[in-house]
Structures are given as C-alpha cells and as structure tokens.
C-alpha cells in the first residue's frame, strides 16, 4: 500500500483539487480566448468568463491559505501580472485578443520556469523552497554563511505549480 503524503494542515487531496481546478481553468480560459478571437458575442462568453474567474480564485485560494508570501514569490508575481493584464481588457477592449494572448504567454513561462525563479521571494530576496519550514531555511543559511543567498538545489525544478 502506497502512503499518501498530505501537507501538514493541508486540505485532503489538495494536489487532486489543484490539478482539477487547473484543468477546468485552462479549458474555460481557452473557450474565452477562442470566443474573443472568433468575435463571439460577449454575452455568450459569460459562462466561460465566470468559470475562469471562479476557478482562478479557487487556485489562488489554495496557494494563499498557505501564507501571503506566495504573492511575493516569482510564481505569485506572474499571477499578479496576468491579473493586471486582464484588468486592462475592459479598458482596451479592441486590444483584448493580444492582451489575452499575452496572458497565455506569461502563464506558460510562469508554469515552466525553473524553481530558482518560481520560488524566489521578493520579500526575503532568496529562494524559498516548497515544503521547507522557514526555520530550516534560516538555519541552513546561517550554517553555511549564505544568509539571504540561498538557491534551489540542482534537479529541484518542478514542472508544475
């Protein structure tokens, strides 16, 4: 029998929730982008828009419940940039397709960039590794004399968020 690793204090089956929400989010955003590219009436895109918003909010909720520092990690900053671009869509309606395509580019880069960028904390000015308690990060930095200059170990890139 294989042991199932649940994060401390985490949501049961959190990884499954994350994958499921991400799948729904990508499908809904694909419909939304395609609808705008093919000039479908905006009222017909309300469903995909709301599913995209709600699934994105749920994904952010999964991350933010672990702590607000996520907003300051490379991967969180990429999400904030995407949200900023999305807020420009109603203002620059005629440029909505290029703006939505830019969101796809940022999402792709953000999802697949090396962990040394995904987990870099703008607050701590160093990489904050997932599943590593803050005390261990500080102790490690102090013991090797590199406080504030930690980097992810080789091979620690994670292909998915």
Image (tube, helix red, strand yellow):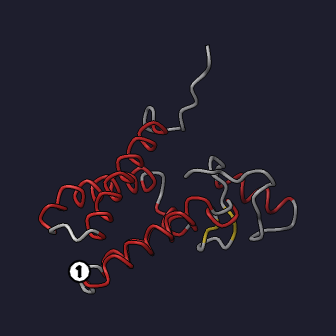
Q: Which residue of the protein is positioned furthest toward the top in this rendering?
A: 1
Please determine whether, in this image, residue 5 is positioned above or below residue 24.
above
**Residue at the spot x=12%, y=65% of the render?**
43
Q: Quadrant of the N terminus?
A: top right
Q: Position of residue 85 (x, y in %)?
A: 38, 78
Q: Splitting the image into 4 quarters, where does residue 115 fall?
A: bottom right
Q: Which residue of the protein is positioned furthest toward the right in this rendering?
A: 144
Residue 41 located left or right of residue 121: left
Please determine whether, in this image, residue 39 is positioned above or below residue 19.
below
Residue at which label 1 appears: 90
**Residue at the spot x=69%, y=64% of the render?**
127
How crowded pointer 1 is (Cα within 10 Å; few <14, some 14-19, many 20+) is rated as: few
Q: Foreground residue, 132 or 153?
A: 153
Q: Foreground residue, 103 or 18?
A: 103
Q: Foreground residue, 100 or 124?
A: 100
Q: Splitting the image into 4 quarters, where does residue 11 fall?
A: top left
Q: Foreground residue, 95 or 117?
A: 95
**Residue at the spot x=78%, y=51% of the render?**
155
Residue 11 located left or right of residue 97: right
Q: Splitting the image into 4 quarters, where does residue 114 fall?
A: bottom right
Residue 142 located left or right of residue 130: right
Q: Position of residue 142 (x, y in %)?
A: 81, 62
Q: Position of residue 40 (x, y in %)?
A: 19, 67
Q: Position of residue 42 (x, y in %)?
A: 16, 69
Count of marks placed on residues: 1
Q: Which residue of the protein is positioned furthest toward the left in this rendering?
A: 43
Q: What element does badge 1 sit on?
A: loop
Residue 42 located left or right of residue 104: left
């Amino acid at each position: 029998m294989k042991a199932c690793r649940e994060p401390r204090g985490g949501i049961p089956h959190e990884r499954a929730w994350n994958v499921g929400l991400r799948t729904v989010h990508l499908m809904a955003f694909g419909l939304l982008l395609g609808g705008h590219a093919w000039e479908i009436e905006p009222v017909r895109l309300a469903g995909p828009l709301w599913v995209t918003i709600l699934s994105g909010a749920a994904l952010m909720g999964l991350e933010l419940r672990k702590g607000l520092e996520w907003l300051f990690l490379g991967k969180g900053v990429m999400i904030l940039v995407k949200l900023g671009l999305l807020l420009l869509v109603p203002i620059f309606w005629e440029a909505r397709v290029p703006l939505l395509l830019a969101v796809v580019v940022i999402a792709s880069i953000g999802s697949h960039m090396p962990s040394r960028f995904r987990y870099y904390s703008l607050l701590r000015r160093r990489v904050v590794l997932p599943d590593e308690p803050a005390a261990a990060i500080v102790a490690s930095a102090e013991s090797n004399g590199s406080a504030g200059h930690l980097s992810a170990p080789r091979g620690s890139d994670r292909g998915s968020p």
